[in-house]
Amino acid sequence: MTISEELKRAIVQMPQKEKDKLLLRLVGKDDNLVQRLEFELIEQGDTIQIRRDDLKRRILKVAQITHATPGWMMMDMRSFSGGISQHVKITKDKYGDIELTIYLLLTFFECQSAMLLVHNSKSDSCAEYIAKKTDGLLKKLNKFDPDYFVDFEKDMQKLLDYVHSHCPKNYARTLDIPKNWP
C-alpha cells in the first residue's frame, strides 16, 4: 500500500512520542523485521558466524539421520534451504548464503551417499532438486567477487564431482552444469 504525500507530511509532524508508539506497534507485526532489527541493533552484526555455525550444526545432525527415502531427505534439504534463506534475509549475509548452501549439499551427499548413488523413480525428484540447487549456486557464485573463489573452490569442486557421479548427473547434463569450477 502506498502512502500519500499528505499522510507522509502529517506523520512527520506528529509528536515524537506518538511516532515511537506507532513504530513499535508496526515493527512488532513483522517477525522478519523484528529479527533483523535484533541482529543489527542488539547483536550489532557480530553474531553472523555464530548463526552460520548453528545452521551447520543442525544440518549435520539431520544429514546423519538415516532417511527412509530420497524424498524424505529432499524435504529436509528444502527445509534447511528455507532456513538459509531466512538467515540471509535477516543478516544480508551473501557469503554465508553460498557457504551454507554448499555445506548443505555436500553434507547430505557425504552422509547419504548410498541413497543418492543410483537414479531411479524414488530418487528422481531429489536428483532434480540437487541439480537445480547446484545450478543456482553456480549462478550466485558467478555474480560474487572472484577474490572469494579460492574460499569455495575445493568444496565446490567436490560438490560438482558428486553431482556428476551420482543420481543428479542426468539433470546436471541437461542444465549444463560444468564438471569443473571455476
Image (cartoon, rainbow, N blue to C red):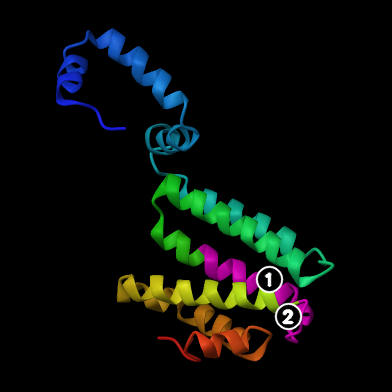
Image disc number at residue 181? none
Please check the rendered image and state whether residue 108 is part of the magenta-colored stretch, yes or no. yes
Question: Which residue is at a point 35% across and 16% down the rendered structure image?
Answer: 22
Tags 2 and 1 touching, CB below 8 Å: yes
Along the viewing direction, whichever of 50 and 93 lies nearer the viewer: 93
Q: Which residues are magenta?
A: 100-122
Q: Secondary structure at mark 2?
A: helix
Three-letter amino acid code at the position of disc 2:
Leu
Q: Position of residue 169 (x, y in %)?
A: 61, 88
Question: Which residue is at a point 52% across and 76% down the rendered structure image?
Answer: 134
Name the quadrant of the C terminus.
Answer: bottom left
Circle 2 or circle 1, nearest the eye: 2
Please check the rendered image and state whether residue 164 is part of the magenta-colored stretch, yes or no. no
Three-letter amino acid code at the position of disc 1:
Phe
Q: Which residue is mark 2?
A: 116
Q: Which residue is mark 1?
A: 108
Q: Secondary structure at mark 1?
A: helix
